[in-house]
Image (cartoon, rainbow, N blue to C red):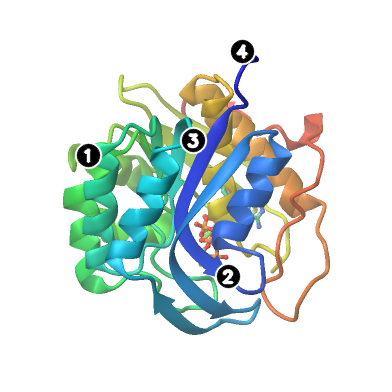
């Protein structure tokens, strides 16, 4: 039999404007030449300006979608994005415990760039108790990391400290994304299971067209793992990809515009990787 195409899955919400959520994930999977399945847990009426409405999919339907995918496809890595509420978090956790979908990247989406809540307050505890221990890697941005760790981040030392706290909550590996910082460079921090840690830095692109950056980097890591990369290389390669998608901007919408998922990665997109700053 011919080698099967690498298959990955996203469990997330839709964005009607196509920039974030499942749309960003599928575009990223396609750009990485892996096959992407999608399990929809919520539908958002959303554009580059904000989120106008959200409707959750029923727990039974979420479970059924996961069963349908699991009964047929050979998923070797998957990610979760917007999960919305605690019931959905519990439902997804129960289903992924039952079926082996391979490496799990947990993007703990809480608030969209426009300010809309995409995860209820009660669901945060459910993410920590049910999903963190199952994840290969968790990828919070700065505000999400503060919420998970119950600790403020003001300095680079705080970033490393908060990543350690998140690991102590049960996460094996942590990528703490620095897009919400205000320095001239962006600083992403990685803490691996074996204690290895490193920073990835790149020049901050002066743009508001960053809708879906978190979805995109977590989907790119998922794809790289399915292609057989080590976790460390997957993270660094994914960072270069998201940099290319931001730097080669496209002009869509009137607010936080979407990324250019068909951008090519060139040498200058590679982050500087440093053990310490
Ligand atoms: N303006 C920017 N210039 C360059 N890289 C950015 C910029 N904004 C975000 N990134 C990168 O995009 C990725 C996602 O970061 P972030 O925006 O913090 O996540 P989220 O979309 O979850 O809020 C990170 O690798 C971060 O360094
Ligand atoms: C349906 C949906 N899922 C996730 C997000 C958040 O995506 P993210 O990559 O964190 O990007 P921003 O929205 O923060 O730019 C979303 N907006 N919608």
Q: Position of residue 105 (x, y in %)?
A: 41, 40
Residue at image point 47% right, 33% down:
75
Query: Callout 1: helix, strand or loop?
Result: helix
- What residue sits right under mark 1 in the picture? 133
Q: Nearer the viewer, mark 3 or mark 1?
A: 3
Residue 88 point in image, percent of width and height:
28, 63
Q: Which residue appears at 29% of the width and 53% of the height? A: 92
Camera-side residue of 59 and 220 = 59
Q: Are marks 4 and 3 in contact (CB under 8 Å)?
A: no
* Residue that mark 3 sits on: 73
Label 3 vs 1, first from the N-terminus: 3
**Is any atom of residue 81 visible in this view?**
yes
Q: Residue 1 has which mark? A: 4
Residue 101, x across and y down, in percent: 38, 34
Separation (CA) of disc 3 from disc 2: 25 Å
* Mark 2 residue's CB less than 8 Å from ligand 2: yes
Crowdedness of circle 4 by 10 Å Cα count: few (<14), some, many (20+)?
Answer: few
Furthest residue toward bottom: 52
Nearer to us in this view, 181 or 223: 223
């Amino acid at each position: 039999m011919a080698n099967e195409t690498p298959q990955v899955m996203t469990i997330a919400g839709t964005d009607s404007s196509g920039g974030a959520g499942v749309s960003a994930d599928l575009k990223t999977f396609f750009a990485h030449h892996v096959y992407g399945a999608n399990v929809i847990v919520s539908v958002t009426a959303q554009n580059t300006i904000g989120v106008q409405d959200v409707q959750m999919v029923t727990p039974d339907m979420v479970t059924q979608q996961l069963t349908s995918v699991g009964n047929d496809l050979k998923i070797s890595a998957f990610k979760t994005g917007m999960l919305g509420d605690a019931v959905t978090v519990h439902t997804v956790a129960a289903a992924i415990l039952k079926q082996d979908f391979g490496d799990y990247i947990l993007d703990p989406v809480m608030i969209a760039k426009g300010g809309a809540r995409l995860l209820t307050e009660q669901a945060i505890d459910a993410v920590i108790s049910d999903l963190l221990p199952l994840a290969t890697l968790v990828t919070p941005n700065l505000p999400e990391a503060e919420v998970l760790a119950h600790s403020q981040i003001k300095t680079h030392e705080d970033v490393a400290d908060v990543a350690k706290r998140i690991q102590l909550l049960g996460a094996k590996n942590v990528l703490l994304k620095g897009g919400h910082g205000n320095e001239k460079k962006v600083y992403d921090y990685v803490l691996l299971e074996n204690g290895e840690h490193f920073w990835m830095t790149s020049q901050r692109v002066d743009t508001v067209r960053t809708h879906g950056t978190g979805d995109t980097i977590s989907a790119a890591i998922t794809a790289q793992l399915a292609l057989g990369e080590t976790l460390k290389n997957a993270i660094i390669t994914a960072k270069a990809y998201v940099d290319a998608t931001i730097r080669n901007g496209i002009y869509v919408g009137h607010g936080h515009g979407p990324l250019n998922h068909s951008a090519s990665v060139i040498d200058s997109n590679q982050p500087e990787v440093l053990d310490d700053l």
